[in-house]
Structure formats: C-alpha cells, structure tokens
Amino acid sequence: MKVTIASCTGAGPVERLAHALTALGVEARVLEGFSDRRWRELMASRGIGRARARIGSMLVFPFRAIAHGFFRRPSVLVATTNPFYLPLVLIATRPLHRVPVVALVYDVYPDALEATGVVSPGGLLARAAAGANRFWLSRADAVVFIGPEMAEHVRGRYGSPPYWEVIETGASVSEFDTVYAHTADAESELERWCRGKVVASYVGNMGQMHDWETVCRAVPRVLADPALARLCFVVAASGPGAEYLARRWSGLAPDRVRFEAPLPDPAWARLLSSSSIALVTLKEAARETSIPSKTFSAMAAGNAVVAVAPAGSDLAAVVARERCGVVVSPGDVDGLVHALRGLALDPEALCLARDRGRRAVAARYDVRVLAGRWLALLTVATTKPRGRRLPMAIVKRALDVSVAVAGLVVSAPLLGILAAAIRVTMGRPVCFRQERPGRGGRPFRIVKFRTMRDAEPGEDLLASDAMRLTALGGWLRRTSLDELPTLWNVLSGDMSLVGPRPLLMRYLSRYFAEQARRHEVKPGLTGWAQVNGRNAISWEEKFQYDVWYVDHQSLALDLRILARTVIKVLKGEGINAEDHATMPEFMGPEPKTP
C-alpha cells in the first residue's frame, strides 16, 4: 500500500505517523508545501513573505496535491485540514485523480474562524463553508477525527460521515528516550539555564484559539510569590500570543522568564525533556474545534500538563482521564496560579502526574500503537466498493465554492486595502456593479472593483473609457485585482471559476446562433479564450474558443485553464479583455468577404 499524507505545514505529527506506518510495511510519505522552519521565516517577514506563504498554502499546495494524486497514483491520499479546505478539494477532484481520499481533521472550520471572530456565525462565508463540509464529509472514503468531542460536534452540525474513526494525534515516547541519554557536555545553553529549576514551558503555536490572556495575568503573580522562587517559564512559541506575552512580560526578571524562537524538533524535544510542567491552552469558544497536538508530546516527555481548557473539550478530557495534570477553566487566573503553585510545591504530586502522562502515551497514544489503527482504517478505505462518480456539475461547483471561499479569506486584508485606496482616489462607490448575462442569458449583477473615475458633464461614456481609467484602475486591471470581488459571484452561483467571460447584456441580440451557445454554461472568471490570445484575437475567434469550451468542458480542462491563468497573471499579461478601454465594442458578426 502506498500512502501519501498531504499537509502544507506543521508536518511533525504526520511525519511521525508516516514513519510508524512504514515500520508496518506501508510505503508512506508526506507531501508538504513548506518546512516548519521556512513557514516561520516567511510569516515572520510579513509583507511579501507572508503573502507568499499564504498563497503557497491556500492556492498552490492544493493543486500540488491534486497533481500528486494524478501522476503518482498512491493507494490513498490522506488530506489533512492544512489548509482547511484540502479535504474538499481532493474529494471534489477525485474523479480526476481517482485516488481514495481519507480526511484527517486537525481543526474544524468554519468553527475555528467563528471562535476567533474572523468569520461571523451564520454569515455568508460560514454558510458556504458549512455546505462544503456537508459535501465532503458525506463523500470521503473515510474521516479521522483527533478527539471524540470534536467528532460528536462535527457529526451533529454537518452530518455523520459514512465511515469515520477517532484516532488521536499521539506522540512517540522513543523520541524522548534518546533525549534522556544526552550528557552534560552536550547540553545547550537553554538546557543549562533550565538546570536546577522547575520549568514550565509553552511550546508550539500560540494562535487565536489559545487562551494566552489567562497565562499572561497568572505568571506575574506566580513570580511574585517567594515560595515559588524555583519555578521559571520558557515560551518557545510563534504566533500572536507569543508576541503579546513578549510585550506584556518585557519587565519580568530574565532569570525567571525566557522567550525562544520556535525550535526545530531535536531542540524542541530537549526543551520538553528539561521541563517539568507543560502549559497548554484553548479558549472557551474553541471547545470542539481542536486539541493541541503538543499535549501528547508533553505527556510523552514526562511533563505534567496544566491545561487551560473549557469543560467538555478533548483537551480537558484527556488530562482529567489520564490524571496527568490539572485542568483550569479559561479566564480562571486564580485557578491557574493555584495549579502551578500546587505542582511546584508538591514534588510527589508533580512526579506522579509526570509518570502517569508518560505511561498513558506508551500504552494508548504512542504513534506506533495508533499506526495499527490507521492501517486498519486505510485498508478498509482502499478496498470498500466505490460508488458512482460524481456528476461534472457537482464536482465543478465544489471546486468553485472551495476556491472562492479560500480566495476571499486569504485576500480579505488586501480587499480592505484596495477598497480604501479606491475610496480615496475615486470616491464612492468602491465597487462597480452591472448586469451581465449568465447561464441561459439570465441577468445577474457582476461585482468588480471600480477602475474609472466618474464622467465629466457632457463627456461621452464609451468614447472616454481610456481617458477615465485612473492610474490605480489601470494597475488593478493589469494585475487582475479588480476581479477579486467577483469571487462573490462565484460563491453565490452566478458564475464559475472557468467559463466564457460575461460580456454585456446588449450583445445578446448581436450573436449568431452558434455564438450564443457560449451561454449554455455559467460565465467564468477566466476562460479558454482568455488564455489563448486575450486582446490579440478578434471577437469571432473569442467566441469560437468559448463554444469549443462548451463542447469539451471537463475538470481536467478547467484545471489546465486555471493553471495557465495563474501563469499569465504572474507574468503581468492579465486576462481581462471585455472593457472598452482595452477592446472595441462588439457590434455583431463581421461581414463575410465574397
């Protein structure tokens, strides 16, 4: 069996799973977009680096995963929720790559975005994402959840998958066994700093779902207690929470609080082995969305876990069930101070919690144990009878929704910046809306960023298009950024990602019957004509390309057009051609020369 696990970033847990499956005779590999180190470098650089990371993760990597399935033909693709819509994309394109898809749910979306305030509950994006979830959950060859509470929540909100299992992320006890053997001569400066202290560490990501505020308020109180002079803190994390703590704790004693950049796996494992207590947090609103994978690594390293976690979460349940630490409610600063004080001043209780966690991982959560459960699930997923292929319309719509949702989420900051720039340079309205013919010629209102100033009194609207095009508007057209709001038309179902471009309503009466066939499908953001000449070809040639697309449309052709479109946009060639500033008005078929 050949297994490919697709995860754009954060490949540590899936790398351990791949190694464990390989030990069982499975040919397992990880397909990743960025190494953890490269991802952190790009995100830390902000600006272009961060944009490159987001585009690579949200847009490029899913296409890489599709191509991997199509060309490499593994026995099964395991699609993690990194990026969050990867299971949707690989399941929607399964008729193309023909590889069974198992979804590995690390985080639940849009729930995680709702919990952090990025998406409004019940809003358009949330409803679209919920519909996408119902689609792929009902059609996955198998679904793996990393916690039972998460599984119950997803099944209750989106429907139960036909075949699903709960398999925890787990950890590898042996990874820390080798660390225990290191000598004092091999100690790093950080390990020497930890020696002789009771160290509480926070490692990994500290994102919007984590309750860093409770930690921020509790630690200064702990440091002010003379009885807790040996208790010190190390934060080796990335994300907004780590930046927030660094600012708020800048005045605390450096011999008691230390910040480290996120560490590579060997150094990370050695820090956990030098710690006695691991801090793991989760906000109340994120109760059912995830369980931090660092929980099991901390247990495997022999750390007592102090979990700031809501009741009913998988995180709270694991710590309570295994009796490997203390659970504190989010926002309970007094409770967190009491938990840290209790463990630091009671060596016997601390030792007992550390031992219980390590034994629990060895018995139930070691990745070698979990790999056996994975092998059984993958065997069923790859041998169960396959249903009929999804109709092209369903696959195409799923691809439209997934890319539109991802595009709107990723480009949200850019949309705001461009809207503000248009407002300053051209005034209101920011967006241009106009009726265009959709499928069957039915009108819909297309939405684009405005690129022209208002006409002066007496100025001819058509003749002055080029004169009214502003410098910002010209740049928006050249970069195709004026099309970003049109993703709303794709999301609402008026348009598709690929199809003949929507022209003007008045053109409908000017087509020949054959040319009018371009309206047998939804109009698209880009199309076969746009990647085969753009303004260099005549209207008649454009319509020939459009009708050819109608007769030959397929998922493979759509992906080919999208790939060529990306190349054209990156080269600055653009794909927008219907506006009069760049193309004369279509007046009807050209007369034939006798």
Image (tube, rainbow, N blue to C red):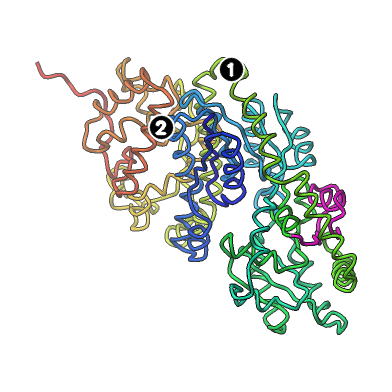
- Find the magenta span and give its range: 302-327
Q: In the rendered structure, does residue 319 fall within the stretch colored magenta?
A: yes
Q: Work out whether 105 lies above or below 586.
A: below
- Residue type of the residue flagged with mark 1: Arg
Residue 220 shows up from this direction: yes
Front-most of 70 and 183? 183
Q: CA distance from mark 1 to mark 2?
A: 24 Å
Toward the viewer: 248 or 131?
A: 248
Which residue is most to the left? 594
Give how far across and how far down residue 248 sits, in percent: 70, 76
1 and 2 marks in contact (CB < 8 Å):
no
* Membership of 512 in magenta stretch: no
Residue to which mark 2 is pinned: 559
Which dot marks residue 386? Answer: 1
Residue 197 is situated, as x and y percent measured from the top left of the image, at 76, 77
Q: Residue at x 60, y 77 (%)?
A: 189
What x and y, as percent, mark residue 36? 53, 56
Q: Which is nearer the eye, 87 or 121?
A: 87
Q: Secondary structure at mark 2?
A: helix
Question: Is the residue 433 above or below the residue 235 in the image?
Answer: above
Could you tell whether 52 is left or right of 21 in the image? left
